[in-house]
Image: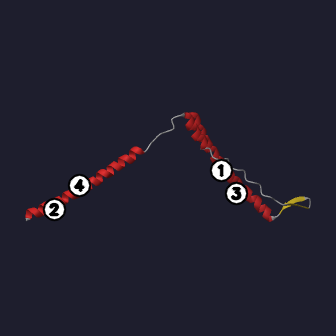
Amino acid sequence: MKYNKKSKRLKVKQNRRKKTHQKLVILLLVLIGLISCTTTKLPTERADYNSLLIDMIPELPSIPNLPELTWSLENDKYCLSETDVDKLLDYGENELPLYKFEMDSFNKQLELILNGITNK
């Protein structure tokens, strides 16, 4: 009786081991298949590399438009209303520095791309 109980337990343990072993083998096969299917090709020809770099050139930032102002002539002097002065100050303090920053970053990106084309 004791022998039968032990043999049954042993068979159950062996079946569990077989199932986990099969699952591990399948998992390993799947992982090997996934890893082997990936490619790590780099551009082989210089022309392809250069065309990739040229495609990476960003668009040139657009120059901000000068706000439309209404000038008036009083006592032989040209004058602006307060709202027009605010528009002009906003243009000089916000839009022009933003444009300069965008142009600086454009120039840096362009330099990197040109260096990549000429040095490779």
Residue at the image position 74 percent from the left and 57 percent from the top: 91
Is residue 83 in view from this perspective? Answer: yes
Q: Is residue 52 left or right of residue 94?
A: left
Q: Are marks 2 and 1 in contact (CB under 8 Å)?
A: no
The color scheme shown is secondary structure
- Give how far apart the Cα atoms at labels 4 and 2 are: 14 Å
Counting residues from the N terminus, which is met first, the one under dot 3 or under dot 4?
4
Residue type indicated by callout 2: Arg
Counting residues from the N terminus, which is met first, the one under dot 4 or under dot 1?
4
Residue at the image position 37 percent from the left and 47 percent from the top: 33
Q: Is residue 59 left or right of residue 4?
A: right
In the picture, which quadrant includes the C terminus? Answer: top right
Which label lies toward us, 3 or 2?
2
Whole-percent x, y for residue 119 in the image: 56, 34
Is residue 120 in view from this perspective? Answer: no
Which label lies toward us, 1 or 3?
1
Q: Which mark is residue 68?
A: none
Mark 4, residues whose alpha carbon is within 10 Å: few (<14), some, or many (≥20)? few
Whole-percent x, y for residue 13 in the image: 19, 59
Counting residues from the N terminus, which is met first, the one under dot 1 or under dot 3?
3
- Give how far apart the Cα atoms at labels 2 and 1 are: 74 Å
Name the secondary structure under disc 2.
helix
Mark 2, residues whose alpha carbon is within 10 Å: few (<14), some, or many (≥20)? few
Residue at the disc numbered 4? 18
Residue at the disc numbered 1? 102
- Give how far apart the Cα atoms at labels 4 and 1 are: 64 Å
Residue type indicated by callout 3: Asn
Q: Are marks 3 and 4 in contact (CB under 8 Å)?
A: no
Residue at the image position 67 percent from the left and 53 percent from the top: 98
Residue at the disc numbered 2? 9
- Give how far apart the Cα atoms at labels 3 and 2 are: 80 Å
